[in-house]
C-alpha cells in the first residue's frame, strides 16, 4: 500500500500572534509573535509599532527580545519568536501593537490589541482612578 506523505511547506513568510492581550495595571506583560519562513531567506529585521508608530524601546518600560532563528518543522523552514515586554502597564499602554518582520522581498505583520484588566481584591473590583 502507498500512503500519502504530507509535508508542511512554507513558501512565503508568515507571522502569527494572539489577537488580544491584557494585564492588571502596574503588572508586566509580554506580547508574543511567531514568524515562520523559508530557510533560504536571510533573517528579517524585526520591529514593533504602537498605534501605527514605531515603538521607542525604553529599557525601563519596553524591551524587545528575539529568539531564533531556529529550525522549523522541517529542514526547509526557520522559526523566529518576537517578544515585547511591557513593564508596569497603565492606561497609556492600551491600544494596538504590531509586530513586523522585514525580509526585504516581503514584510509580514500581525496585530495584538492590549487592554487593562480590572484589579480585584477579595473578589471586589478596585477603582483604578480612570
Image (cartoon, helix red, strand yellow):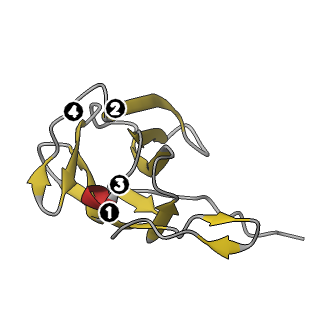
Q: What percent of the width, then of the height, locates residue 94?
A: 31, 64
- Alpha-carbon distance for marks 3 and 2? 16 Å
Callout 2: 10 Å neighbours few (<14), some, many (20+)? Answer: some
Q: Residue at x 90, y 71 (%)?
A: 1
Total number of numbered labels?
A: 4
Q: What percent of the width, then of the height, locates residue 108?
A: 25, 57
**Decide: marks 4, 2 in contact (CB < 8 A)?**
yes
Check disc 4 and report its element: helix, strand or loop.
loop
Marker disc for residue 57: 4
Q: Nearer the viewer, residue 123 or 50?
A: 123
Vertical arrangement, residue 70 with respect to residue 115, above or below: above
Callout 4: 10 Å neighbours few (<14), some, many (20+)? Answer: some
Which quarter of the picture shows residue 20? bottom left
Mark earlier in primary sequence (4, 2): 4
Mark earlier in primary sequence (4, 1): 4
Q: Which residue position is annotated with label 1?
A: 110
Q: Is residue 40 left or right of residue 101?
A: right
Q: What percent of the width, then of the height, locates residue 100?
A: 25, 51
Q: Which residue position is annotated with label 2?
A: 63
Callout 1: 10 Å neighbours few (<14), some, many (20+)? Answer: some
Q: Which residue position is annotated with label 3?
A: 90
- Alpha-carbon distance for marks 3 and 1? 22 Å
Which quarter of the picture shows residue 7? bottom right
Mark 3, mark 1: which one is toward the viewer? 3
Check disc 3 and report its element: helix, strand or loop.
loop
Q: Residue at x 49, y 47 (%)?
A: 29
- Alpha-carbon distance for marks 4 and 1? 19 Å
Amino acid at each position: 500500500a502507498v500512503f500519502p506523505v504530507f509535508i508542511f511547506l512554507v513558501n512565503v513568510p508568515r507571522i502569527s500572534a494572539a489577537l488580544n492581550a491584557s494585564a492588571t495595571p502596574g503588572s508586566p506583560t509580554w506580547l508574543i509573535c511567531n514568524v515562520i519562513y523559508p530557510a533560504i531567506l536571510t533573517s528579517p529585521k524585526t520591529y514593533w509599532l504602537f498605534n501605527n508608530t514605531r515603538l521607542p524601546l525604553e529599557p525601563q518600560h519596553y524591551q524587545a527580545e528575539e529568539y531564533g532563528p531556529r529550525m522549523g518543522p522541517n529542514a526547509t523552514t526557520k522559526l523566529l519568536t518576537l517578544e515585547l515586554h511591557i513593564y508596569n502597564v497603565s492606561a497609556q499602554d492600551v491600544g494596538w501593537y504590531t509586530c513586523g518582520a522585514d525580509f526585504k522581498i516581503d514584510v509580514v505583520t500581525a496585530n495584538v490589541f492590549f487592554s487593562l484588566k480590572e484589579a480585584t481584591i477579595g473578589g471586589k473590583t478596585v477603582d483604578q482612578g480612570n
